[in-house]
Amino acid sequence: MSGPGAVTSGKVPRARGKGAFGVGRGTWQYALMSSVPTDLLPHPIVQAPMAGGVSVPQLAAAVSEAGGLGFLAAGYKTADGMYQEIKQLRGLTSRPFGVNLFLPQPETADPAAVGVYAHQLAGEAGWYETELGDPDSGRDDGYDAKLAVLLDNPVPAVSFHFGVPAREALDSLRRVGTYTLVTATTAEEARAVERAGADAVIAQGVEAGGHQGTHRDVPETDGSGVGLLSLVAQVRESVGIPVVAAGGIMRGGQIAAVLAAGASAAQLGTAFLATHESGAHALHKHALTNPLYVRTELTRAFSGRPARGLVNRFLREHGPYAPAAYPDVHHLTAPLRKAAAKAGDAQGMALWAGQGHRMARELPAGQLVEVLAA
């Protein structure tokens, strides 16, 4: 492939004889069996792909240009919409970047439960003067079409959320020179990622903002997630592929901590949400440090899957009753969230944020990478 952002050799180079990022193996308190390629990210900093309009090309470009690994979020976009953003990003940077895909979800939702929740949300629809969305708007997020685009027009890295892709998909991406990463929230899930043939696993702690990347949506396990440092240690001892740590990381000292625990890099979302280039709504950015929002909570209120956000009115009122029904509930509430944002009402928006949200800094994304790296 050619053009800005391409890995022109056809293969992503692998680091040899060094720890992650060219550090000698004896430098740290652990020995990495493998590492993320230094050519992919000179600094051990990955910008989390945040769906819903946050991870725009300008943000990913700024992070990559500063030596991190910027990511586009293909979730909730069409295949063509994803492709257009990739083209735009390639026009902004010649550095490597990544694209994130959502895995198709099984049909496990109870239509009756979704109907009851829709009835409960009728008052919200009346308040915001909008209609509820169609819960049957699709379950696969255009996965096959997006994967086909990424095979025809390869990018340096692709990550996956909400499950493990088929080995055939991972092998196909490897053949075109793409480095693959898959999210896991337990050591067991990490082993499944390794068995499938991914190049690296993203260990996502319960502190993370936005959707938990669990491979199976089991309501009985809600709230039982593992903290990041414990998870990184467990995953590091369970797999031989590189580990990228994600969840609540906001400072360089925390990046150093996860590297010492065995990670090869750190993935940050909330920290980049507040940056100048972020596509997040201004109300969302302001809410991160607004004293009105004192804590975060995992909720199914907005999407039907556990996701961490700032506790606002919508989350308090509807969270306890939201069914385990993703993406049905996401489609159902989409017009409400859009209308709330248009009305300037943060109390009706999905204010995704990790537990470290109060440490958010409104900086240019490139400057934030430099501060974190320093």
Image (cartoon, rainbow, N blue to C red):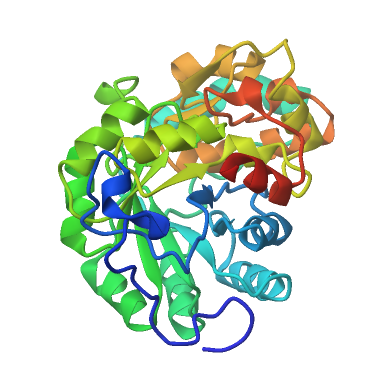
* Left or right relative to 315: residue 142: left
- Vertical relation: 162 (above or below) 79: above
Q: Residue at x 47, y 85 (%)?
A: 152
Observer-nearest of 238 and 29: 29
Q: Residue at point 31% right, 61% down?
A: 18
Front residue of 302 and 138: 302
- Judge by depth and name the residue closer to the eye, 311 or 47: 47
Q: How many marks?
A: 0
Image location of residue 367, percent across then percent down: 72, 46
- On screen, residue 77 versus residue 174, left or right, reads right
Residue 15 drawn at (x, y percent): 34, 68
Q: Is residue 128 visible?
A: yes
Q: Quadrant of residue 251?
A: top right
Q: Is residue 195 above or below residue 254?
A: below
Closest to the observer, 258 or 193:
258
User: Where the C terminus falls, by quadrant?
Assistant: top right
The quarter of the picture where residue 361 lies is: top right
The answer to whether residue 111 of the structure is visible from this angle is no
Residue 325 point in image, percent of width and height: 40, 36
Q: Is residue 44 left or right of residue 277?
A: left
| Picture layout, residue 127 above or below residue 292 | below
